Structures are given as C-alpha cells and as structure tokens.
Image: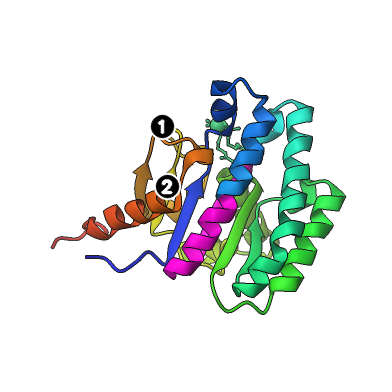
Amino acid sequence: MNPIPAHVAIIMDGNGRWAVQRGLPRIDGHGAGVETCDRIVTESSAMGIRYLTLYAFSDENWSRPVEEISALMDLLGQYLVRKTPKMIANRIRFETIGEIDRLPPSVQSTLQATKDATAAGTGMTLIMALSYGARSEICRAVSRLLAEGAREATQETIGARLDTAAYPDPDLLIRTSGEYRISNFLLWQAAYTELYFTETLWPDFSPSELRAAVEVYRKRERRFGGVR
Ligand code: IPE
Ligand code: IPE
Ligand code: MG
C-alpha cells in the first residue's frame, strides 16, 4: 500500500449543474461549493495530507459572464474572511498559484491578508489555484529563464520557476462531476500523478468520498515507468 498522499489536487467541478438540477441560479451552486471546500479542507488537514491544491478559477473561466465572475470573486473574499481564524486554529498555511494580479484589487488584498495571517502555519498547506492556467504558468517560467539570460532549459530550471516551485508534485488528482479532462490544470506537475474521477458534483463531494479516493490511491501501483 502507498502511504497517504502528501499532495492532493482537486478540480472542483459541477457547481453549476448542481444548481440547475435544483432549479437554482448557478451562483447558488458556487455558494454550496464553498461549503464543500470548507469540509474538504478540514478533512484533508485532519487526515495528515501535507498539501491540498484546489482549482478554484481557471484562466479560461474569465470567459464566463461578468455576473458569474463577480459572484465567484465575492464568494472567494467572503470565504477567506470567514475561514481565516479556522485556518489559523488548524495551523493551515494559505498560499496561491496563478496570476493573482488579474483578480480584483479587493480580493488581492484579502488573499494577502490571509497569507500573512497563516504564514506561520506548520500543518497543511492549502494552495488555491486562482486565475490559473498551466500553459501560461509554463510560459511565465520559460520567460523568466530567458530574462535571466539562460541558454538552455532543464526540468529543474523550469520546475524551479513554476508557481508550484515550493511544493512537491501532486500524488493524487481528483476531478468531480464526471468530466474526464485536465482543463489546463498542473500539466507539468501531473506527469506521474494518480488520477481519480468521480461522477459526484462538487457540492455533494463529502469527506467520506475523499477518504475513499485516498484508499483507491493507496492501492495503486506507482511504477514511474520502471518495473516492479
Ligand atoms: C466549478 O463548477 C467551479 C468553477 C469552475 C469556478 P462549474 O461552474 O464549472 O460547474 P458546471 O461544470 O457548470 O456544472
Ligand atoms: C475547471 O472546470 C476549472 C475549475 C474547476 C476551476 P471548468 O468547468 O471550467 O472546465 P471545463 O470547461 O469543463 O473544461
Ligand atoms: Mg465546470
């Protein structure tokens, strides 16, 4: 059996469909999704997962209607303000990946306040992917290398310039809502990540399903291209 994954990454998908199934506006699905975030963060930290990366807003999500984007930004800000004390209590350190400077200034300052308030956390690191796209992340890393005058690129020099430079690659990637794709998430880092797909819509994803996904992961044979 594999040990518990050090790093779990989740594509939190299906909020809109969850709401539409109930005759509610899509925004209500995002509101329910935020509550799932809170439960999953708490459970992950209790399980001893060291890093949890949550895909909350992609580069491509900027193409959604402005009303939905602004509702998502409001929910994000409220979530951070509401949950920072709990993060501190659980020794969770909050960080982000993605192009944070594209977010509304008020959200940027709330993000910074939460990072500052949780910086001393020695427990789980919670990483929110916001305005994140793996292709643009790789391009930014390569551009930095070029600006530094590098004549060649290696896996190490690119990896060290990605937003995720400080974290290990994810061991387990979960996607909810029955979509079987990566949607521009952690393309570089997921080279050898174990994938777990579930039909469950994100607002219905539970701590017990997280534990079930981790049990599936623990039984996987990770060969990394080698032989047993
Ligand atoms: C995931 O739920 C949340 C974000 C992408 C912000 P969706 O909003 O994509 O929900 P569906 O996929 O339309 O059901
Ligand atoms: C992926 O979900 C992005 C996030 C969960 C933040 P989407 O709903 O945006 O992805 P597609 O459009 O189904 O690929
Ligand atoms: Mg979706």
Secondary structure beneath label 2: strand
At label 2, which amino acid type do we have?
A: Ile
Does the beta carbon of the residue at mark 1 sit less than 8 Å from ligand 1?
no
Mark yes or no: residue 64 visible: yes
- At x 77%, y 58%, the residue is 81
The three-letter code of the residue at mark 1 reads: Gly
Query: x, y (%) of residue 198?
Result: 38, 38
Toward the front, the furthest residue is 22
Please state the total of marks drawn on the protein image: 2
The answer to whether 73 is drawn above or below residue 94 in the figure is above
Q: What residue lies at 62% left-to-right and 33% top-to-bottom?
A: 29
Quickly name the residue at label 2. Answer: 174
Q: Determine the image quadrant of residue 149.
A: bottom right
Would residue 164 be found to the left or right of residue 46 on screen?
A: right
100 magenta-colored: no
Magenta stretch encompasses residue 54: yes
Answer whether residue 222 is visible to the viewer in this image. Answer: no
Give the CA distance from mark 2 to mark 1. Answer: 11 Å
Give 127 or 188, whichever is nearer the viewer.
Answer: 127
User: Foreground residue, 224 or 10?
Assistant: 10
Vertical comparison of 108 with 102: above or below: below
Q: Tell me which colouring the rendered structure shows.
A: rainbow
Residue 151 at x, y percent in the picture: 58, 62
Q: Is mark 2 within 8 Å of ligand 2?
A: no
Q: Residue furthest top?
A: 23
Q: Position of residue 143 (x, y in %)?
A: 66, 54
| Front residue (pair 2, 98) | 2
Magenta span? 37-60
